[in-house]
Amino acid sequence: MKRIIPYATQWIDKEDIGAVTKALKSDYLTQGPRVKEFEKRVASLAGAKYAVAVNSGTSALHIACLAAGIGRNDEVIVPAITFVASANCVLYCGGIPKFCDVREDTINIDVNDLKKKITKKTKAVISVDFAGCPADLAEIKKIAGKKGLIVIEDASHALGAKYKGDYVGYGKYSDMTIFSFHAVKNITTAEGGMVVTNNERLYKKLLLFRSHGITRDADLLQNKNDGAWYYEMHVLGYNYRLTDIQCALGISQLKKLGNFNARRREIVTEYDKAFQKLPGIKVLHRSKDVESANHLYVLRFDSKYFKCPRKDIFEFYRKAGIGVNVHYIPVYYHPFYKKLGYRRGLCPVSEKYYEEAITLPLYPKMTKTQITRVIAVTKEVLAKFSKNN
């Protein structure tokens, strides 16, 4: 077997290692000055007033739902094609995920289906910027505004992406925006996440939920007579704090985000040029009013064109040393969600997409040789599995 080209991997350099080493030698390992600096830098990039760093994108989604007031039996609309965390965060709060279908071309939430899924119990919408391409944020905000719904934008794939000229997280279209810094994301803190918002009330709630529900804010303390040591627990919060060590890595990585995303665009351009005119496969659409962060590159293999199931194509890639993946299984296909009563047939576009999708390698460290190899193996797939051959 040839050496595997992974579908994604981090890029850590000597500056990153130096930043982490410096943090390890400092007085702070957990909640120190680097946490605040990282929050400030991400907020500045996004154009948001406030940012709250947490230990994962999943934790960011959870505290966003908590801050939004999601509770027992509240419905939250979530696209069917996403990682399970985008829906699980609703369950954590006692709410009910209501799965919405996706657009055929972008695999982002379908606003027409979104309108149909809203009921009197709906309290929020979690939109997902799939593969790094922002969803129809203006239309989602318009729909949500008419119904008084909170919009949580899951931009775990989309740090550095733009929508209508503004960086994702700007706050014009979403009440809160989520970023993830997992190892395969556009920058990494190993594990980590962040919520950005322009709403001070939500910001203060996010801070509470991140750290045990505890505050030292003099304006919030009910007992103002004790000394500087005093703190109060106001809500049932969690220990979702991100460390200074991880934020040191995040600060260093953030300085390279522009270069990382530029390299991703170069690779995507090469892929598009190679694949757009090939029969039987489709690339995802990127509309003119967005600038994608290009987190994933997905090809769709038309089942009518090929004489084998997608599984055979997937295994051919793997045997050829191409570490392909699939993003994502419709959330309600998972056994846990089946136990909750969800059944196939809810979102036909999502289900069809899942039967056809394969994610190709895409990461800034990819070499010209690796890119050429991925393209060559894809052409081999067509030669081997096409019904015409």
Image: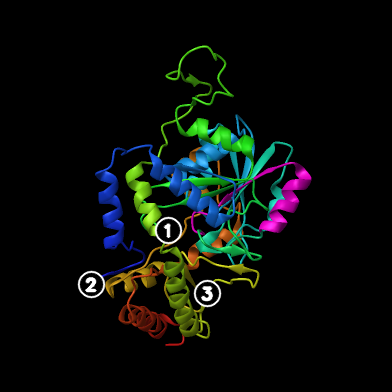
Colour pattern of the rendering: rainbow
The quadrant where residue 286 appears:
bottom right
Determine whether 293 is above or below 76 in the image: below
**Marks 3 and 2 close (CB-CB < 8 Å):** no
The residue singled out by tag 2 in the image is 3
How far, Cα to Cα, is label 1 from label 2?
30 Å
Span shown in magenta: 137-158
Please report the residue visible at 25 percent of the width from the left and 50 percent of the height from the top: 21
Residue type beneath disc 1: Leu
Q: Which mark is residue 254?
A: 1
The residue singled out by tag 3 in the image is 283
Q: Residue at the left extreme?
A: 1
The earlier-in-sequence mark between 1 and 3 is: 1
How far, Cα to Cα, is label 3 from label 2?
26 Å
- Of the pair 38 and 138, the residue shown nearer to us: 38
Residue 334: image location, x then y, percent: 46, 47
Dot 3: element:
strand
Relative horizontal placement of residue 85, taking residue 48 as reference (left or right): left
Residue 327: image location, x then y, percent: 45, 60
Query: Any magenta on residue 146?
Result: yes
Q: Residues within 10 Å of mark 2 (few under 14, many from 20)?
A: few
Residue 298 visible to an observer of this rendering: yes
Relative horizontal placement of residue 316, taking residue 173 as reference (left or right): left
Q: Residue at the top extreme?
A: 225
Q: Residue at the right extreme?
A: 146
